[in-house]
Image: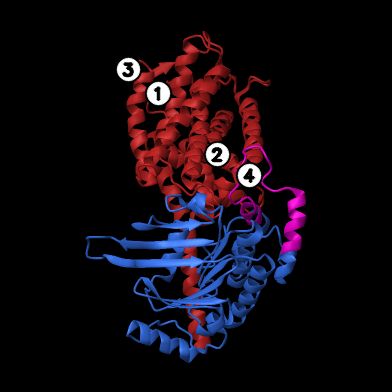
Chain colours: A red, B blue
Amino acid sequence: MDIAKLFNAFPGAISQGIIWGIMAIGVYITFRILDVSDLTVDGSMATGGAVAAMLITAGYNAWFALLVAFLVGMLCGLVTGIFHTTMGIPAILAGILTQLALYSINLRIMDGKANTAVNVNKFHVLVTSRNVRVLSFSNPIVFSVLVTAVLILILCFFFRTEYGCALRATGANGAMARAQGINTNIAKVFGLMLANGIVAFAGALLAQYQGFADVQMARGAIVIGLAAVIIGEVVFGKLLHTFSGKLICVSLGAVIYYLVMQIVLWLGLNTNDLKMLTALVVAVFLAVPHWKSKAFSRMAAQKGVLEDA
Amino acid sequence: MLDINHIKKTFNPGTITEKRALTDVDLHLAEGDFVTIIGGNGAGKSTMLNAIAGVFPVDSGNIIIDGQDITRLPEYKRAAFLGRVFQDPMTGTAATMTIEDNLALAYRRGQHRSPWKRGITSNEKEMFREQLKRLGLGLEERMNARVGLLSGGQRQALTLLMATLQKPKLLLLDEHTAALDPKTASKVLHLTRELIRDSHLTAMMVTHNMKDALQYGNRIIMMHEGRIIVDVDRETKVSLRVEDLLNMFEHTSGSALDNDRMLLG
């Protein structure tokens, strides 16, 4: 167990964490603001990566690739949204359907191959793992922190606008939102589009960072996104109450997740067991509020018995 | 003002849980009417209000507000005409949003919501503060508090304010004091009357409290098995007592009024 080896791996873990943090912000929009568990992201993140990889290797500008990935991600969200609202399919199932369909579509995007390499020597990319120790703007940590900051600013602006408030109301209380004249179906579809646009954008960054896109690159992404959201809330939730603060928590949650994963790998955990570990961590953290409320109601009941006696 | 022409609604038709909720409702309201609605369990009181609000489509008949047929409009579009307060204090407000955010949402009822314009302006905040003072609950000092932190009575008072902030053509009150303790309930009812009077609103109020039904409003209707069986106008209502109401009900429906939550006096 060489501690230097662990520290050596930290810059890579941090930059990966920040890129996944962008994806987790998309998950936050559906999971926390819209109150929908959207499983589309497992597909749409890979779609973003595939689109970016194909465009960049075809000679297009990397910024342009990011923009197209975002738009294609919105399309993925649109499909899930239509499944859910117009066709009345439960949100979770709607997301699973789109995700499954996207597997085929992602293969189509990549000309039938399971992965596409983006060679850093041949193409200009915005982020690459090669530069994690470079002290300049080309360092992926610097670049993705800036991107995250801009994204958080834009989202803060949007969720304070009239329509942004309508979206928040839709997630908080659909019946109330409709009574206030909000078309909650359109709001949900739009929220899903926005979230998946951001997720695909993160996928496009990740493909550049790791130097390839792969149909499997986002398997279980929803769980990692949820882990980031929940870890962020548990660790920093008491400190940051504003909307921007909450989004920063999500991003930090993703970084912590990747640092912890790096540590358990360093401790000798088999890489193949990582996903199981992630699933267990998320399951436990999701259970905590449930157990808490159960314990509280039991305490309240006992108190009631005492007072009655 | 409001014309409900022979609306019918059956839930789960053709199944074992079939429920004929509205068998034939015909009702006409004049501008400024404040109607209280009473009736037994499952008489169709809430269903009628929900039919007006567009929570579900009706099977037949039509609903006209101010000459405009709204029968086919979706719920969110009808919101432009309607202010609504529900029985459950949780339903009318967004618990995770602040008091001022909730008011701002209600202030834009029936209007286009832009993705560029601020969801709440500083002028509006001042106006909301003034309006909140009318409630006499001190909420004007807690405008940044989440609505989830408020008591049931405070939430109902806030919902009432939200429903009237943008003057509705029709105010629908669905047993909005049923979940409150008697003292709070009477406070919210007084507030209701005040708001209705000040803004000259047309209103429908479902209640299980016979005394309230007599005390408030200028017209009483009684429902039974999905239809209106008694309609008492202003002149008769003034001299009416609870016993008269019960007799009227038994006489018309041929059965005793059966509502396990009914308060007689």
The answer to whether mark 1 and mark 3 are in CB contact below 8 A is: no
Q: What amino acid is found at the position of numbered circle 1 in the picture? A: Asp
Mark whose residue sits in front, 4 or 2? 4
Question: How far apart in space, not on screen, are marks 4 and 2 (Cα)?
Answer: 21 Å
Residue denoted by label 1: A214
Mark whose residue sits in front, 3 or 4? 4
Residues marked 1 and 2, same chain? yes
* Element assignment for label 4: helix
Q: Is residue A160 on the magenta stretch?
A: no
Residues marked 3 and 2, same chain? yes
Q: Is residue B119 on the magenta stretch?
A: yes
Quadrant showing the N terminus of chain B? bottom right
Residue denoted by label 2: A25
Q: Nearer the viewer, residue A6 or A45?
A: A45
Chain of the residue that carries numbered disc 4 in the rendered image:
A
Give the mark, 1 or 3, whose residue is nearer the N terminus: 3
Chain of the residue that carries numbered disc 1 in the rendered image:
A
User: Is residue A12 visible in this depiction of the protein?
Assistant: yes
The answer to whether mark 3 and mark 4 are in CB contact below 8 A is: no
Q: Residues within 10 Å of mark 4 (few under 14, many from 20)?
A: many
Q: What amino acid is found at the position of numbered circle 4 in the picture? A: Glu
Question: How far apart in space, not on screen, are marks 3 and 2 (Cα)?
Answer: 30 Å
The answer to whether mark 1 and mark 2 are in CB contact below 8 A is: no
**Could you say which disc has been placed on residue B12 in the image?**
none
In this picture, is A158 found above or below B154? above
Residues marked 1 and 4, same chain? yes
Mark whose residue sits in front, 1 or 3? 3
Q: What amino acid is found at the position of numbered circle 3 in the picture? A: Gly
Tell me residue A284's x, y (percent).
44, 53
Mark whose residue sits in front, 1 or 4? 4
In this picture, is B203 found above or below B190? above
Residue denoted by label 3: A112
